Amino acid sequence: DGGITQSPKYLFRKEGQNVTLSCEQNLNHDAMYWYRQDPGQGLRLIYYSQIVNDFQKGDIAEGYSVSREKKESFPLTVTSAQKNPTAFYLCASTPLTGPGDDGYTFGAGTRLTVV
Amino acid sequence: AQSVAQPEDQVNVAEGNPLTVKCTYSVSGNPYLFWYVQYPNRGLQFLLKYITGDNLVKGSYGFEAEFNKSQTSFHLKKPSALVSDSALYFCAVRALNSGNTPLVFGKGTRLSVIA
């Protein structure tokens, strides 16, 4: 079955440590997105990418970095510069077909906790 | 700029009663609107979308949404609520002819259906 796989499901980070969240899709989608979800704040866009080797900052990119070396993969690194990284992280993808597509396909999420 | 407002953090409804989850939006030009549902510790699942045409859109699990251009609203409805409908609901928007700019999500409304 096609879909998006996020790993790990749970991740614990020590202060000052960088961690990388994985997002892989086998849907042949062009665009991929990272959102952060905090209680009462909805989903906030971190980074997105519409083609390989290109990505754009979202609303809350500070303290995060991404790469898009392959169409299927869009890993997110949470750096030590992100002061409050505890949150639920969601990856999504969509084909670049314009109106008519069904919006995003989401992964199951990664819950990151600072210990 | 695009924005979405979900004015209610929480909606409580008795099983069997009709439910409404409210959403208003702001976008330049015509909107492309979505509703998604999220169950605990999971990603978001697509419920329905509006592009053009009939103002009443039917979606998954018996949900429907009514587009009202003059009120810039896209309220989610269901004639008879089930306990299993209890979840977090997100409204999202982007401009119809904006290429593939990222969706903007509301803060979410938690629906609780009481048996």
Image (cartoon, helix red, strand yellow):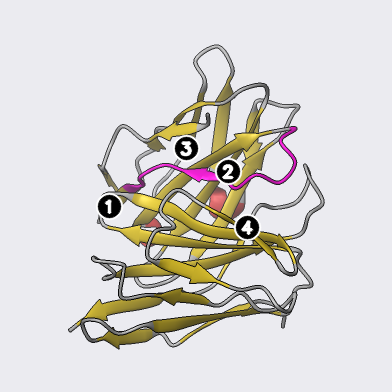
* Region in magenta: B97-109
- Between the C-alphas of marks 1 and 2, the distance is 21 Å
Chain of the residue where label 1 is placed in the rendered structure: B
> What kind of element bears circle 4?
loop
> What kind of element bears circle 2?
strand
Q: Residues within 10 Å of mark 3 (few under 14, many from 20)?
A: some
Residue B97 in which image quadrant: top right
Kind of residue indicated by mark 1: Ser
Q: Of the numbered discs in the image, which one, if any, rests on residue B77? A: 3
Asked if badges 3 and 4 are on one and the same chain, I answer: no
**In the rendered picture of this protein, how many numbered marks are placed on residues?**
4
Kind of residue indicated by mark 2: Phe
Residue lying furthest left in this view?
A: A115
Q: Nearer the viewer, residue A63 or B12?
A: A63
Residue B57 in which image quadrant: top right
Q: Position of residue B46 (x, y in %)?
A: 58, 56
Closer to the camera: disc 3 or disc 4? 4
Residue identifier under label 4: A104
- Between the C-alphas of marks 4 and 2, the distance is 10 Å
Identify which residue is drawn at 42% across, 52% down.
A44
**In the rendered view, would you say B73 is above or below B20?**
above
Kind of residue indicated by mark 4: Tyr
Q: Of the numbered discs in the image, which one, if any, rests on residue A28? A: none
Closer to the camera: disc 2 or disc 3? 2
Residue identifier under label 2: B34
Q: Of the numbered discs in the image, which one, if any, rests on residue B112? A: 1
Of callouts 3 and 1, which one flags the residue occurring earlier in the amino acid sequence? 3
